[in-house]
Image: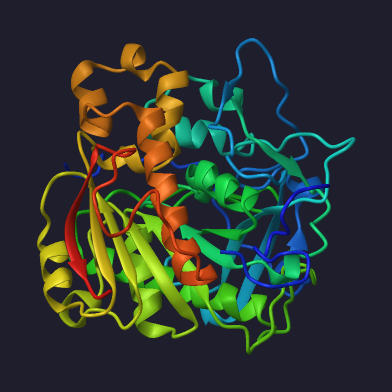
Amino acid sequence: MTNQPPPDGASADGSAQGGSAPDGSVPAGPVGKPSRRWILRASVIGVTAALGGGLGAGAAFASPSDTSVPLPAATGPHPVGTRTFHLVDDRREDPFAPTPTPRELMVQVWYAAAGHRGLERARYLTPGLEPVVERRFELPEGSLGTVRTGAWQDAPAHPRLHRAPVVFFGPGRQDPAATGTAFAQDLASHGYVVIGVNHTYDGPTQFPDGRIIPQNPATGDQALLRKYSDVRAADLSFVLDVLTGQRATRLPAEFSRTPHHTGFGVFGHSLGGSAAAEALRTDPRFTAGACLDGALQTDAVKTGLGQPFLLFTEPMELPTWTDFMAHHTAWGRRMVLAGARHYSFNDLAALGVGLRLDQAWTPERHARFFGTAEGRRSQAVTGAYVRAFFDHWLRGRATTSPSLDAPDADYPEITIGWTSGN
């Protein structure tokens, strides 16, 4: 790690440096509820050995081969590590479980690593979840097993990780948190700690005892979508409680923060973006957030937010965006990505190129997911703006390119569709 900046963005002396969503349900896999004995075990479990992988990580490691499909390379100076944890919220019953049981979550953490000698790259998904997600997106069988991440499983943390800014990520409806791996790896390579939250029953989840909970069916019911968004926001606040020592459950010291730590970011794709807005509305510990092409199922559309918020969208209009922009008076921006569609804003955009979905899918289906924007470029542009946003609001860094305030010649596909505040 010589000659690399510390992950907190400080110098050596510690001073600061300056379309509609595609739909579809998946056939149910084995579903079960945990035994009472299981729930009463330790609430946080490092699950690499038990699972053969967490969402996006595992002990059955990915190996490079001629058929590997790599995720976009991270652009920062740090190697990236990843770990997964099992959390149980004993203060809430799961509203979606078939029988009363505490709310269980799997979370994945990406972070700047001290090194990776002798380690293996993490899996993209657990073997149990690969076929679930392949069926959801009508991907070729076995294709997700070929995806190669850039993160090193269980790598030692950078010694200054305890000072790094923390950002939460939430996936789209029916999706696992792994679909934001490229964003998470890139942020982590620049010194962020990124926590991806898998929202059980809303999206597919695999637990350490082998249970696979598939995602609930697709829905257009607005009341139910609002419920999903609200539960997700509560999930985010629970994980933040754990992170800051407000629960008996604890994460390892390198990821923990004090209760007085200020400035946590949150962003998400689709419904994950709605949950980010709701978390900002209901939990003041979150101080900056972004929504990637998600309808806002939150009262924030009626009131706006008191924190800075970035809308990053395809070129269309949604009533919830219009209402939110009309009521939000804090710093806000809407960036519009030309030619994009709903899945231009997560890993599927870039993976679709490597998996040759333009050949595997019909032209109509491919256009419905990705529009005319090239997938790897969509992912790179979105990631650059998300990082610039959090660099500005969590690190106090002035960003020149990409610009959050003016058209940028290096990003000609971006139009600024709305501004609020300075």
Q: Is residue 60 above or below residue 196?
A: above
The residue positioned farthest toward the right in the image shown: 118
126 horizontally vs 265: left or right: right
Residue at 49 percent of width and 48 percent of height? 176
Q: Is residue 14 above or below residue 390?
A: below
Occupied quadrant, residue 410: top left
> What colouring style does the render use?
rainbow
213 horizontally vs 189: left or right: left
Q: Position of residue 365 (x, y in %)?
A: 23, 25
The answer to whether residue 378 is visible is yes
The answer to whether residue 52 is visible is no
Q: Position of residue 221 (x, y in %)?
A: 19, 60
Occupied quadrant, residue 301: bottom left
Instruction: Indicate the quadrant containing the C terminus: top left, top right, bottom left or bottom right.
Output: bottom left
Q: Position of residue 199 (x, y in %)?
A: 48, 60
Residue at 16 percent of width and 80 percent of height? 302
336 horizontally vs 402: left or right: left
Residue at 44 percent of width and 46 percent of height? 383
Occupied quadrant, residue 33: bottom right
Q: Is residue 144 above or below residue 274?
A: above
Q: Position of residue 10 (x, y in %)?
A: 68, 66
Count how many numbered circles sit on residues in the image. Answer: 0
